[in-house]
Amino acid sequence: MPIVPVSAPGTASLSSGRLSVRGARVHNLKNVDLEIPRDALVVFTGLSGSGKSSLAFDTIFAEGQRRYVESLSAYARQFLGQVDRPDVDFIEGLSPAVSIDQKSTNRNPRSTVGTITEIHDYMRLLWARIGVPHCPDCGEVIQRQTVQQIADQLMDLPERTRYQIVAPVVTQKKGEFVDLFKELGAKGYARAIVDGEMIQLAEPPTLKKSYKHDIAVVVDRLVASPDILGRVTDSVETALGLAAGIMQVNFVDEEGDDAWQSFSEKLACPNGHPLQLTEIEPRTFSFNAPFGACPACSGLGTRMSVDVELMLGDEELSIREGVLLPWTTQGKGLFQYYERLLEGLAVDLDFSLDTPWRKLRAEVREAVLRGENYKVTVKWKNRYGREMRYSSGFEGVVPYIERQYVQAESDTQRQRWSEYLREVPCPVCDGARLKPEVLAVQVHGHSIADASRLSLGEAREYFAHLTLTDREATIAAQVLREIRLRLDFLIRVGLDYLSLSRAAATLSGGEAQRIRLATQIGSGLTGVLYVLDEPSIGLHQRDNRRLIETLVALRDLGNTLIVVEHDEETIHAADWVVDIGPGAGVNGGAVVHSGPIEELLEDRGSMTGDYLSGRRSIPTPAKRRKIDRKRQVGVVGARENNLRNVTVDFPLGVLTAVTGVSGSGKSSLVNGILYQVLATRLNGARRVAGKHTRVTGLDNLDKVVHVDQAPIGRTPRSNPATYTGVFDRIRTLFSETPEAKVRGYQPGRFSFNVKGGRCEACSGDGTIKIEMNFLPDVYVDCEVCHGKRYNRDTLAVHYKGKNIAEVLEMPIAEAAEFFEPIQAIHRYLKTLVDVGLGYVRLGQSATTLSGGEAQRVKLATELQRRTNGRSIYVLDEPTTGLHFEDVRKLLEVLNGLVDKGNTVIVIEHNLDVIKSSDWVIDLGPEGGSGGGQVVATGTPEQVARVEGSHTGAFLAEVLGIQPAEVRKAG
């Protein structure tokens, strides 16, 4: 495919100096020497596992970060993460380094796209300065109140109402306030309310200086009667003077929210509704502060609620058979205690515990699930046969779970009950995170939550066309400029479909990385070294051009960009390309090519050059598999997130690609609905699917497998041998050797995870951590086992001349030959070799595997399992981190699964995968609110001919289909 670079390679100044690396030996790097130009866009490419990230992140960026941290004081360094000195001789020409990778997604539930881009901060300022407050009860504009108006409202209270007029002199401020207490006492005030407690000013409390406090002085204590108008007026005027125009009334005989009413000289509802909004400041609009946060959800916008679907088993079962999972002993029916309670309820409501749940009356099901006000008689017989009885209250399953979750005293208990809960929007604020009175402040008819819910593209239009008065424009000009500028940067990196209210924890790695990239552009820094990890991940080809333009703009500010990337268009746009290889793992770690793209295209020793020049390619299948219309899984009425009542069929026994621009609804359809239903119905998992009507065609399937790029283990003890299960067979083989039998060794002797055969000095880790205080922790080989993990006696057992530690150090390809006579072991290892992992060591730590390598280990594990051809595999962007050659191998693996009769569904943007699929489902046409529809379905050739399909347009170019052959969508 011909690529027209966004800026011709070499347009960056390559004469502004060089960044030189000498003797890099991190991970598999083989004493690498490298020189690249500064102030240029440099792409590092190569096979998965070849050493790209080791050179870019673990060497160049790590050294840049380490030098910065070491320039700080010892006091400052203790608060920063320590960075190991990379194994490199020296690096010259290094600028301050910033890493923008995939692992930086913020998991804080309070973080949103708006907060991490700081757009929400500017919006808070805008709403505070030009927002118009309205009454949340009646919608009227809130106006100022005079002393007389406030006094009249208090005179209208029923006679004998007891109340206190209070002046809030301190609100959420730190300090001891000793002088304030003295001053108030000197003025004759006797009482104050401090942090909710009434105190005597003659004996003021000692407050903690570092805590925030609320202090309200009691101005007067009154009982409502017709003859106290003068006293009320004086007290109101005094209270307003003490607290800068704000006062509160505390109704002594009331409790909770009804006990307090706020008044203000500045803000009041003309219809007399109680006022809670005492100030309009930027902090008022923060859901991370108590001033503005919804009290029901504490500003999270969500709450945990019991999901009835999660707590019910098969609804054909009766209560006695165990349909109520929280009250059931697995496989043995109801717990006896709850059985007796429910028998009492059954007598009162006239139903049987043996009736299938589905056939019980609606009011009975409601009573069992949510009943709280029932009294039941519990009967049972003691061991002497006498009938015993007592009266008890009945608590339904839902309130029971809620109570247990709240009262749980340990994480284990809380985890148990959380299995029946799911996150739902807060019923009070409906997910807006703010108090009702804050949401009633509007800028031209929109609350801050309304604007935050818009997609970034819609938000840009809203702020661009905001019609302001001259006064408002003067106040808001600078704020609006900052908001528009930041929105433009986000849209330029292809994120127009996101909303400002989108939780940061729900962003993909690619989305989080592009947000950070946009933020860096907005910062306007120059002379910085940026290291990026595949910024094109999750991005449709249509949006790729805008991303490249952004990278070029960042370079043109005077920065150096090192981009680890496999995307063809990005490589062509680079000023300099570094190809790492030639292979992966032990076969990689060398610089195959370093220079402009034109030289790479001519380099026949570079596999990347071969693919870019067309000397190698991934062929389009000559023949597609036939679609059997009778064997399909159908999703009917999908309405999750932005899906618009979508109905679509997934053919079975073929490779299906689900495509569409970012935010079009692919993940919502496949991961959010289809996979969740399949996991629940086929695997017995406890999952909650997104909104849909039904899923059909499950009779043709036995199980579903989700293969992602998550690590195969979180600790160094996990490795390909343990994950695939082949290590169990290897340990058994060693235990059957003559030497092991003589010594009486069992398979457990050859495990480094349990006592017996492992080295106890390092507990089988092979390394020992030495804490260095202000320096990073140092890991050194264990002095006893010298990194071999096992003790001397275990290492004395050999199979074909090698001990267990030497076997774990073998590359998988070598191990496959070594164990070839042992079919039970060879079959596992051969599958790992087939997926392109022959270079990985058998015992290589899972934490050192890339995402692509981890995914292929999982695929190999599935491949070696015997299957009846009734499995469905779901993969989300499996080409992430994969080179052209890795993609070719991946396609061979996926086709191997399909050839066994299985079904494979991939969410993908990679055109090589899409063109190699048997069936394509294209969603769109745009992202966010502009997507959520099926644009096209069919073979790649059929989709390529659909006008209006962005994917189809790129497929047409790849498949050589002329524009004249294109037909309209539908």
Image: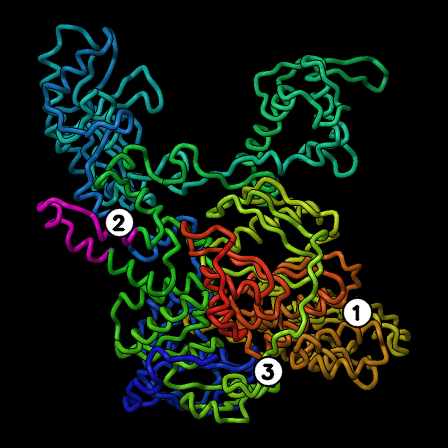
Please say whether residue 780 is one of the residues in the magenta stretch. Answer: no
> In the displayed structure, does residue 744 sit left or right of residue 816?
right
* Amino acid type at mark 1: Arg
Q: Which mark is residue 462?
A: 2
| Residues marked 1 and 3 touching at CB (< 8 Å) | no
Q: Residue 552 carries which label?
A: none
* Amino acid type at mark 2: Tyr
Q: How is the image coloured?
A: rainbow
Q: Residue at x 51, y 45 (%)?
A: 640
Q: Which residue is drawn at 43% across and 77% down?
A: 569
Which SS class for mark 1? helix
Q: Quadrant of residue 705?
A: bottom right
The residue stretch that appears in magenta: 459-483
Q: Quadrant of residue 187?
A: top left
Q: Position of residue 12 (x, y in %)?
A: 30, 84
Relative to residue 604, is residue 405 depicted above or below? above
Q: Earlier in the sequence, mark 3 or mark 2?
A: 2
Mark 1–mark 3 Cα distance, whole angstroms, equals 33 Å
* Amino acid type at mark 3: Ala
Q: Which of 881 and 214 is in front in this view?
A: 881
Q: Earlier in the sequence, mark 1 or mark 3?
A: 3
Which SS class for mark 3? loop
Relative to residue 609, is residue 767 depicted above or below? above
Relative to residue 474, is residue 400 depicted above or below? above
> In the displayed structure, does residue 116 sit left or right of residue 582?
left
Mark 3–mark 2 Cα distance, whole angstroms, equals 50 Å
Q: Nearer the viewer, mark 3 or mark 2?
A: 2
Residue that mark 3 sits on: 584
Please say whether residue 476 is one of the residues in the magenta stretch. Answer: yes
Q: Nearer the viewer, residue 300 or 4?
A: 4
Q: Residue 749 carries which label?
A: 1
